[in-house]
């Protein structure tokens, strides 16, 4: 889940991530989240507006769902292939060593929970559709180098990703709330059943003692 | 990796509005039509026109609480420049009672989000004693953390949030946000 929020943070810090940071491996891990649906040749020149070469490459690799992030990033930086393979472990290892240049909140970096990988599987189908857009090749470059249209598109994309991330967070929160509720209700159910059973037994025991009729309550008058 | 499963954390209510806290007082909020506010539930503006019935837990009638309702996603979740918007503030609520027994410092204003899906957060604070809390000059740009610090309210004792979006969302609701 923290990855989702890192996503947002990255998106909002988009302008701060320059291409030079591609050399920093730690920063690149973050950048490749942004780069994932975008062009993968980050080490090459700043992407031309219509890059056909990188575009087909994400799509075949995206078809198998859990595998793609690894192969995608393998294309971008060979060194990161194994990083993404063991995403969880390497985030542990990576972050203490090279401090990531973008001012990401430190709390978000070590937390890459394994169970959140389904979230990434969710996002993959979305990203697989992105190569259709010719402009999504844009790696998060600073806005100065391109036309305002691309810049606007970029901003729109970032906003879209943020809102998608919020949606995912909402969905996750709702699911968790339901899970908590289910747990509570099951507990309560079990408790009530036990209670009822006890009362039944007590009542049954009571019944055995009574052999004759007798008054149990005095009349109100 | 302690990933919290608390809905308040996942939805970033803890983070955007509150610091991490431990819930220790029960609180039940029910809008008209018997719609109880459950974390991350979605309510329509038409369901939240009037202030809800709030039942506060606790055990000692002498303990007083303050309840606020804020919208951290005002005017839109993508650009919350008015974070947070204060919709309601009731103070000096005795434990085991409800907001009807407290003092309404800021009148309930029914949320009417225009853009996006807003989180609306009810936060309950325990007061140290009976105190006079003054309404802020305006509703927007309210800061719950600063407010709690200013009035020595400490950590929240309970919080619950729900989602609300425009009543009649235009189809393809994302399009209006993109400009």
Image: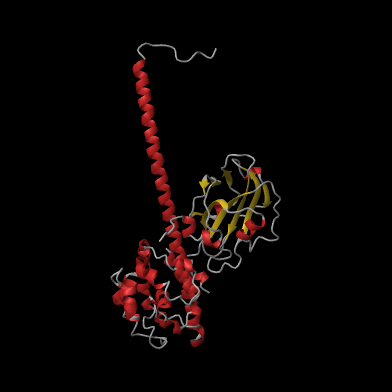
Q: Nearer the viewer, residue A178 or A25?
A: A25
Q: How far from the left and from the top, in percent, is residue B53?
A: 58, 45
Image position of A153 with respect to A88: above or below:
below
Q: Nearer the viewer, residue A206 or A96?
A: A96
Image position of A9 with respect to B41: above or below:
below
**Residue at (39% x, 37% y) in the render:** A191
Q: Nearer the viewer, residue B110 or A71?
A: A71
**Splitting the image into 4 quarters, where does residue A130 fall?**
bottom left
**Splitting the image into 4 quarters, where does residue A6 fall?**
bottom left
Picture quarter with the N terminus of chain A = bottom left
Q: How far from the left and from the top, in percent, is residue B39?
A: 49, 53
Q: Nearer the viewer, residue B133 or B113?
A: B133
Judge whether residue A50 can be spotted in this image.
yes
**Splitting the image into 4 quarters, where does residue A3 fall?**
bottom left
Q: How far from the left and from the top, in percent, is residue A206?
A: 37, 20
Q: Say how many tags the image has.
A: 0
Picture quarter with the C terminus of chain A = top right
Q: In the displayed structure, does residue A163 sit left or right of residue B125?
A: left
Q: How far from the left and from the top, in percent, is residue A44?
A: 38, 87
Judge whether residue A58 can be spotted in this image.
no
Colour mapping used in the image: secondary structure
**Residue at (49% x, 13% y) in the render:** A218
Q: In the displayed structure, does residue A131 sit left or right of residue B43?
A: left
Image position of B63 with respect to A159: above or below:
above
**Residue at (42% x, 45% y) in the render:** A184
**Residue at the limit of the structure toward the front, as seen here:** A97
């Amino acid at each position: 889940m923290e990855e989702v929020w890192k996503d947002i943070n990255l998106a909002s810090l988009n302008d701060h991530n320059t291409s030079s940071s591609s050399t920093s491996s730690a920063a690149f891990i973050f950048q490749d989240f942004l780069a994932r649906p975008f062009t993968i040749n980050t080490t090459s020149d700043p992407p031309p507006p219509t890059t056909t070469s990188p575009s087909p490459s994400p799509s075949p690799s995206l078809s198998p769902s859990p595998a793609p992030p690894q192969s995608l990033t393998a294309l971008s930086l060979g060194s990161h292939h194994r990083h993404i393979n063991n995403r969880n472990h390497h985030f542990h290892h990576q972050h203490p060593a090279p401090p990531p240049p973008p001012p990401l909140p430190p709390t978000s970096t070590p937390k890459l929970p394994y169970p959140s990988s389904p979230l990434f599987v969710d996002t993959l189908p979305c990203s697989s559709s992105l190569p259709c857009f010719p402009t999504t090749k844009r790696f998060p470059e600073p806005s100065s180098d391109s036309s305002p249209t691309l810049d606007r598109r970029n901003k729109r994309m970032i906003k879209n990703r943020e809102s998608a991330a919020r949606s995912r967070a909402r969905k996750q929160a709702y699911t968790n709330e339901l899970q908590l509720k289910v747990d509570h209700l099951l507990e309560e159910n079990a408790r009530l059943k036990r209670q009822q059973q006890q009362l039944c037994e007590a009542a049954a025991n009571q019944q055995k003692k009574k052999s004759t009729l007798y008054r149990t309550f005095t009349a109100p008058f | 990796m302690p990933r919290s499963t608390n809905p308040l954390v996942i939805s970033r209510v803890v983070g955007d509005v509150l610091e991490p806290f431990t819930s220790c007082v029960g609180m039940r909020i029910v809008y008209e039509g018997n719609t109880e506010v459950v974390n991350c539930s979605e309510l329509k503006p038409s369901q939240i026109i009037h202030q809800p019935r709030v039942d506060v837990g606790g055990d000692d009638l002498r303990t007083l609480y303050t309840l606020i309702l804020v919208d951290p996603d005002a005017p839109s979740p993508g650009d919350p420049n008015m974070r947070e918007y204060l919709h309601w503030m009731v103070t000096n609520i005795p434990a085991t009672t409800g907001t009807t027994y407290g003092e309404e410092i800021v009148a309930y204003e029914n949320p009417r989000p225009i853009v996006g899906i807003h989180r609306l957060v009810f936060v309950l604070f325990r007061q140290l004693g009976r105190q006079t809390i003054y309404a802020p000059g305006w509703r927007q740009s309210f800061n719950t953390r600063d407010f709690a610090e200013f009035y020595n309210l400490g950590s929240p004792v309970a919080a619950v949030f729900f989602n609300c979006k425009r009543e009649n969302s235009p189809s393809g609701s994302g399009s209006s946000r993109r400009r």
